[in-house]
Amino acid sequence: MADEIVDIWVYLSATPLLWLAATFIVFQGAIWLNARLGSNPVLHPVLLAMAGLMLILLLTGTDYDTYFEGAQFIHFMLGPATVALAIPLYDHRHAIRRLILPLILSGVVGAGTAALSAVGVAWLLGADRLTLLSLAPKSVTSPIAMGVTEKLGGLPSLTAALVLITGSLGCMLAPPLIRLLGIRDDKVKGFAMGLAAHGFGTAQAFGISATAGAFAGLGLSMAGVITALMLALAGAWI
Amino acid sequence: MHALPGISLILLCQLAGETFVQLLELPIPGPVVGMLIMLAGLVWHGAVPHSLRLVADTLLRYLALLFVPAGVGLMVHFDLIGRDWLAIGLALLISTGLAIAVTLLLFNLLLKSNNSAEGERRGG
């Protein structure tokens, strides 16, 4: 019996099916667990799923390359998802046209602050070059951030984790900052949250109002495009 | 079957973006250019085709799942994180707070001056 189980394991662990299925199932479990814990942004389903899968891989002695053989099919969808971000941008085209200058100006300054201050602080504290390169796009939604890091020569997987942690931090920091600075306009609240904390901030902004959510989606898309362009220029200049 | 044209459109834009980036040797991710091509196409067409919206909504609703495989790759970099955890933690905390505060203040200020400029134009 035990031999049979080992045989089945040996067979399954050599096919992409096992780790593809495991990723879906663990993520499903992580969503359930997050809901049970009161939808806390610090324990986001993605962070829980990452921790769960890493634990499973370490316990079964599976290396990351084997895991990725299966998980790559999910990973591939990041590209199409980035292209799909054009649809929410198109939906907000009227607001964009009306507010084009304020949006671009605050977008460039906000996204620039996020990237520069992250790299600056880490550099002052003596972080590794690879860490610095992977930190730069951390405020941007993951599919874009990982593409940017790859182009810069950083570690996309490190960026993926940093982006997720940034999202959680943004959800924690935004409400007290909004109160402290006395911001009343939902457009402003949403835009800042989407710009600095991508999808996490956008989800939270929809909790404030539909307007805040729409502007968060706008902030998310703009942060992605602006950061990709800025870091491309910076990379060429360095 | 309904999703098929939407999937084709998205992959076509991504392919075009990737080709563009390779041809011009741009340091921008191909899908970002693909997104801009898609946006230009939508503005030109003047509407989002039903099938495209269906596929895009589905992709964006499950966006979180898509970064799990790369995130698990973190296990390969435990050494680097162990070495730089303090720098990474502080950098994330400070930069995220700063970016939110700066964006809130600047966008708020610009919206107010934009609104008053528009009001003046209407008044005059």
Image (cartoon, rainbow, N blue to C red):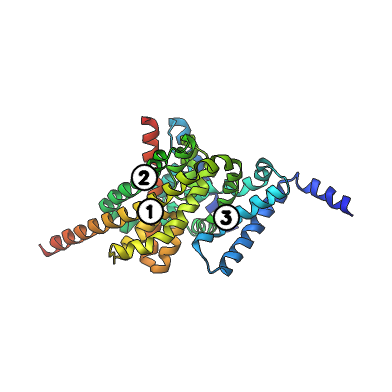
Q: Residue pushed farthest left?
A: B124
Give A121 or B118, whichever is nearer the viewer.
Answer: A121
SS under mark 3: helix
Tell me the element at label 2.
Answer: helix
Residue denoted by label 2: A117
Residues at marks 1 and 2, CA–CA distance in whole angstroms: 15 Å
Residue B89 at x, y percent in the picture: 46, 49
Looking at the rendered structure, the secondary structure element under dot 1 is helix
Chain under callout 3: B
Of marks 1 and 2, the one in the foreground? 2
10 Å crowding of disc 1: few (<14), some (14-19), many (20+): many
**Observer able to see residue A14:** yes
Mark 2 belongs to chain: A
Q: Are marks 1 and 2 in contact (CB under 8 Å)?
A: no
The label on residue A195 is 1
Asked whether, in this view, residue A225 is left or right of residue A35, the answer is left
Query: Which residue corresponds to mark 3?
Result: B65
